[in-house]
Image: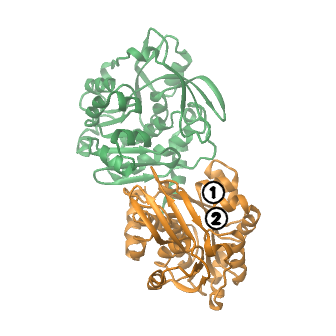
Chain colours: A green, B orange
Amino acid sequence: MYQEAFNRGVAKSMSILVLGTVALDSVTTPQGTRRGMLGGSAVHFSMSARLFTPVHLVAVVGRDFPGEHISFLRRKGVKLDSLCVAEGLTFAWDGKYEGDMNAAITLDTRLGVLATFSPVLAPPQKKLDCVFLANVDPDIQHALLDSLGRARLVGLDSMNYWIHSKRASLLKLLKKVTLYVANDQEARDLSGERNLIKAARALCAMGPSMVLVKKGEHGAFLLSKDFMAQVPAYPVDSVVDPTGAGDTFAGACMGYLAKAKKIDQACVKKAIAYGTVAASFNVEGFGVEKTARLCKADLDKRFVALRATVAF
Amino acid sequence: MYQEAFNRGVAKSMSILVLGTVALDSVTTPQGTRRGMLGGSAVHFSMSARLFTPVHLVAVVGRDFPGEHISFLRRKGVKLDSLCVAEGLTFAWDGKYEGDMNAAITLDTRLGVLATFSPVLAPPQKKLDCVFLANVDPDIQHALLDSLGRARLVGLDSMNYWIHSKRASLLKLLKKVTLYVANDQEARDLSGERNLIKAARALCAMGPSMVLVKKGEHGAFLLSKDFMAQVPAYPVDSVVDPTGAGDTFAGACMGYLAKAKKIDQACVKKAIAYGTVAASFNVEGFGVEKTARLCKADLDKRFVALRATVAF
């Protein structure tokens, strides 16, 4: 069904709208510490999605947000018409990673202007029909989706906090999305199933056309009613900072899908392969250090190398 | 180099010799309890390797070992000329799995006749040139390898106990093997590297032509000096008992390699795909319940299905 909707709309636009956070991140990993870096889900998403298709960002920052970050995003081609600058301080996250760096430990979160964020779209952007709802309050995700016309491709991310505190809202949203992306723990929490295959199947039954389960260094798999696709992670031997890897994965994946002429099994498999490859660059540097410097050819090179490791 | 040795010897024999344990296993998982089941590394290995090539088993059991298990192994085509029946009790393992069943909890181990085991090969078997040294004391693995003529394909497994207590012996052995198989934790322990790619690279530098790292439900990857191969696990939604999954993986992998005309990248990738597929059957039943009933066509069916999930 989503394929029909998609194919009907493909002539309209290939641009993608991303709703999410723009943050100032402070991160400590075994590789070092960075303070006040540009981060946030919408930023990480944009860094990989921009390599496929124009990206329009919907987010809020405070008056303290450095102008150099605005200039940087503009230079990277990210459209900022719906970036709201509000009274107050920018959302800030302070976290660290230890040992195998599989899980972030949050040291401090300052919501700032995010606490009262209500997205307002610049009128021309209401016509965009590919959208990614990165991790924010599900009520805000609903509001944005409702302000769009009929979307042909809707991606959704969430997190454990909303899974537990706004479950009903999230479940309602799931019925409207093409692709729900979750990490392994989120998939288990929302479905109540420990086995990841069962979890993904249960999530699929909740409405989305496709469910993508990200497993960090162990790759990812995608389930639809018709097929399953698996992709191992692109092998990385030096992880510097995993912050934003999931959003970077989603950015390349959605960017590829937004640009595709037809969403079929072959297309979806390529999309998640680009996702894992984009994420591999993200973890090799702090924040957007590596992804900001990427060009499509860098992705393509690892895409081909990854394919060589899995083809049999 | 191992390819040359292999190709020289391919006309000689395709049979495979496996040195390992034959055990009586008692296992409790969330799916139930079984007591005194036929188990052990050499048995699990044989159940999948036999689907590719004749298997000769080298192991010891006690006088208590049930005759029905002997008959069963014979019926499955496993050659028992070098199965020694010694005074004393058969090696027995009592363990359980909880939660996500990723790690076995040992409740009791009775070494029995394994404590004084010294493998003696039936003379015709000394000519066999494909051998898998499943997890036993590295000194015993050495002794068996020395009693063979020039082997063209040598597989080696070990475990944390030997990695720590007989490291020097194990390191010496590594220089003589074609394929070293380890799970993620063993690879980390022996190499001293936490990152699995770095760990596999370090292990490769210790001598083996190829290193296979098994990651359970997350699949496996193989590293040689020339290439890398990755395979996700065949998706299983109901794990009953993971005991022997690693040996079952190794059995199919080694069985495929023993029969191959040439060990090259394409062949190795198929071998590990068969390994993960064989392991997927193993975990779906207690002990050898499922693998004992397998035919090659069952493996082929999942092999093709797995390929469909990863090709992009």
Return the x and y of residue B215 as percentages of the image width and height.
Answer: 53, 55
In the image, residue B87 above or below residue A91: below
* Residue projecting furthest to the bottom: B124
Residue type, numbered disc 2: Ser
Quadrant location of residue B93? bottom right
> Is residue A77 visible to the viewer in this orientation of the structure?
no
The residue that label 2 is drawn on is B158
Quadrant location of residue B237? bottom left
Neighbor class of circle 2 (other Cα within 10 Å; few <14, some 14-19, many 20+) is many
Question: Is B24 or A141 nearer to us in this picture?
Answer: B24
Chain letter for mark 2, please: B
The residue that label 1 is drawn on is B186
Q: Number of marks in the image?
A: 2
Residue in the image at 37% along x and 57% along y: B238
**Mark 1 to mark 2: distance in Å?**
8 Å
The quarter of the rendered structure image containing the N terminus of chain B is bottom right
In the image, residue A182 above or below residue B52: above
Residue in the image at 58% along x and 72% along y: B91
> Is residue A5 visible to the viewer in this orientation of the structure?
yes
Q: Judging from the image, what secondary structure is the residue with disc 2 in?
A: loop
Residue type, numbered disc 1: Glu
- Mark 1 / mark 2, whichever is N-terminal: 2
Question: Is B229 or A125 nearer to us in this picture?
Answer: B229
In the image, residue A58 above or below residue A184: above
Task: Report if the CB atoms under discs 1 and 2 are less than 8 Å apart.
Answer: yes
